[in-house]
Amino acid sequence: MKTYVATPKDRERNWLLVDANGQTLGRLATQIADALRGKRKPTYTPHIDTGDFVIVVNAEKIAVTGKKRADKRYYRHSGYPGGLKSRSLAEMLERRPEQVIRIAVKGMLPRNRLARKQLTKLKVYAGPDHPHAAQQPSLMEISS
């Protein structure tokens, strides 16, 4: 019996819709990362992008446990000496709630060219509306 290896021409890409309202950030991000990589499909191949497009709405309404809203920090550096800046999770949710989910999912993907390509299939929106109605996304079941 031969091992099945997916090729780019026989992959099937679906559009999945996720409502982040009340979902825990880390648990949601792991399931989104699995869908982007294609690990939910029987045709999963690690070196081929077989994953689906994922649309996340209501990113501003995610939940976190404990005191993470005040204690969790996001760091970035300008590249200049003394250029380290940080924001708390509460500030990030206030300013750019889409970026919180994008950073969490990015941390759960491998660090390579394929993962950077897969991350472009993630579409995150702060509110309940999205411009991808023409793709007819199906609702993605999030297991708790």
Image (cartoon, rainbow, N blue to C red):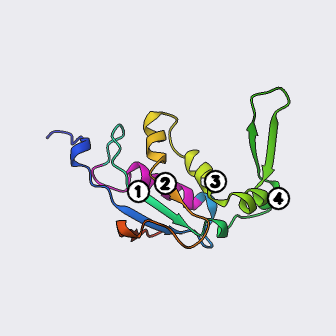
Residue 17 at what x, y percent from top left? Answer: 45, 67
Residue 70's tag is 4
Q: Label 3 crowding class (10 Å Cα cut-off): few <14, some 14-19, many 20+?
A: some
- In this rendering, is residue 109 above or below 133? above
Q: Label 1 crowding class (10 Å Cα cut-off): few <14, some 14-19, many 20+?
A: many
Report the amino acid beneath label 1. Answer: Phe
Q: Nearer the viewer, mark 4 or mark 3?
A: 3
Q: Cβ–Cβ below 8 Å for labels 1 and 3?
A: no
Q: Nearer the viewer, mark 4 or mark 2?
A: 2
Q: Which residue is mark 1?
A: 53
Q: Which residue is mark 3?
A: 99
Q: How far apart are the alpha carbons under marks 4 and 1?
A: 32 Å
Nearer-N-terminus badge (4/1): 1
Q: Which residue is mark 2?
A: 122
Nearer-N-terminus badge (4/2): 4
Left or right? Give the position of 70 relative to 121.
right
Q: Secondary structure at mark 3?
A: helix
**Range of residues picked out in magenta:** 27-43
Nearer-N-terminus badge (1/3): 1
Q: How far apart are the alpha carbons under marks 2 and 1?
A: 6 Å
Q: How far apart are the alpha carbons under marks 4 and 3?
A: 17 Å
Report the amino acid beneath label 4. Answer: Ala
Principal secondary structure, stretch drawn in magenta: helix
